[in-house]
Amino acid sequence: MEENEDGVELEVTGVSPQGMGTAKKGVELYDVRGAVPGDLVEAKPVGVRGGRKDAIVIRRISESVSRTEPRCEHFGVCGGCQWQDVVYADQLKLKRDMVVECFRAAGIGDVEITEILGAEDVFYYRNKMDFSFGWSRAGELSLGLYEGAIQDGETVSDNPKHHAPPVFNLQKCWLQSEASNLIVAAVRESLSDTGLGPYNPSGRTGTLRSLVVRDIKETGDVLVNLNVARKIHAAGVAEAATRACADVKGLVQSVNRKRSRNAVPRLQETVFGQDRIVEQILGLEVQLSATSFAQVNSRQAERLYRHVLHEARLIGSERILDLYCGAGTMSLLLAKQAASVTGVEVVEEAVQDARRNAERNGILNSKFVCKDVLDFFRGKVPEVDVVTVNPPRAGIYRAVLNAICRMEVERIVYVSCNAKTLARDLVGFKRKGYRVGHVQLVDLFPHTHHCEAVVSITRGRS
Ligand SMILES: C[S@@+](CC[C@H](N)C(=O)[O-])C[C@H]1O[C@@H](n2cnc3c(N)ncnc32)[C@H](O)[C@@H]1O
């Protein structure tokens, strides 16, 4: 079927970075909302973004998965949880298939990829959510999540207010907790007649950026971080959050006018209560500040870390280098079973958290260096026996990979959140004479296409 007014027949073969199905017809590339790899669909193109056509499914001609009724009232509008209508067992199968395909495409299809470790809790699993301030389609201030779909006939730049996708007012999200839903509603209400608008980094107009809620499942403790471009009088926001949820232990205001909302804040003030909360990970007390990195699914992170410890095969005498260590959770778990650990991390606050967490847990054989990993390798590098790496989605730079190989360690354990860059980097290690072990997959993000992987890399070709 050629594209006509009714739609176009598409065979979905991949997944876009936003979690939509991808397809190609002739020279046209499509992102298809509501479709997953293996589906054959009739889809209606509804707009264009970044040179790709956005399409919605009109009819599924054949399906590659079993589908279920999505629980969330925002499903189909929200940019998250694209796979909530796929039964969980099939989500896991899809994730594994995607990893297998990345490895095949990179020319390392012979690497063994295990079954994925699925989650027991597929709802309310997140310990952290980042809710955005933005404009709704109606042009009102909203606090919630970005819309994932564009509407019929629309291009993303159609609405001048939309320097970013529209944000819908979230009523109930199933990913974090009932508490975070209540806090979002209360904070939105408290800011509704202040005249403050969402921040637009292009024009440097507006004020409000995002509201980050961290909650600890075991204790129920909650920490709230209000991200703004210029400091506001936030006592009313703190009062609203605590009225909505008595477990809010602190509210921090972070001021950041940079383009990236994740940039280190220029200023941070505690508006109310404490600026950190504590959670337990495999018996470790981990204290987290408002902005430092931690795995968002604590229960599944424990399974991931257990596997890292297993693959590191420590007997107690090893010196370990943990690159991209975040707030040091993995480093400290490794340190408990090794002679020493050096963690390297670029975010100053995360490094401070890591040092505090080492002290709090009496782990004296760990040290943390605040540096870009590339710069770290430009200086004097300690002698170690095992290297662990857990980079962001971009994977590791070629120069970093080469520097790791020059260390000539027997074992490297690579933890990845992006199968494509993992496969690329494993090809790099293989070329340098390393042997790639099997890949263990762990699902930390039910209802999304994301998946974590742990793989051990040893010296000597297979
Ligand atoms: C996936 S997280 C690692 C998490 C950590 N292993 C844990 O279990 O909590 C990746 C970390 O790499 C850090 N990072 C990103 N780019 C970096 C770079 N060029 N040099 C050093 N750290 C970097 C990020 O700040 C983030 O904390």
Image: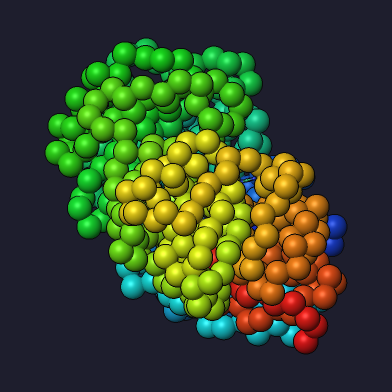
Picture quadrant where residue 32 is located: bottom right
As rendered, which of 423 and 245 lies closer to the eye? 423
Please name the residue shown 24% across and 25% down the image.
272
Please name the residue shown 70% across and 69% down the image.
409
Please name the residue shown 20% across and 53% down the image.
219
What color scheme is it?
rainbow
Q: Is residue 425 above or below residue 461?
A: above
As rendered, which of 105 and 439 lies closer to the eye? 439
Picture quadrant where residue 21 is located: bottom right
Q: Is residue 408 left or right of residue 453?
A: right
Q: Is residue 168 left or right of residue 182?
A: right
Picture quadrant where residue 300 is located: bottom left
Residue 245 visible? The answer is yes
As rendered, which of 73 and 218 lies closer to the eye? 218
Q: Position of residue 218 (x, y in %)?
A: 22, 57
Identify the image quadrant of the C terminus: bottom right
Q: Is residue 213 above or below residue 312?
A: above
As rendered, which of 402 and 363 lies closer to the eye? 363
Q: Position of residue 436 (x, y in %)?
A: 71, 78
Q: Position of residue 314 (x, y in %)?
A: 52, 75
Q: Position of residue 395 (x, y in %)?
A: 68, 56
Q: Is residue 113 above or below residue 343?
A: below
Please name the residue shown 22% across and 46% down the image.
221
Residue 45 visible? The answer is no
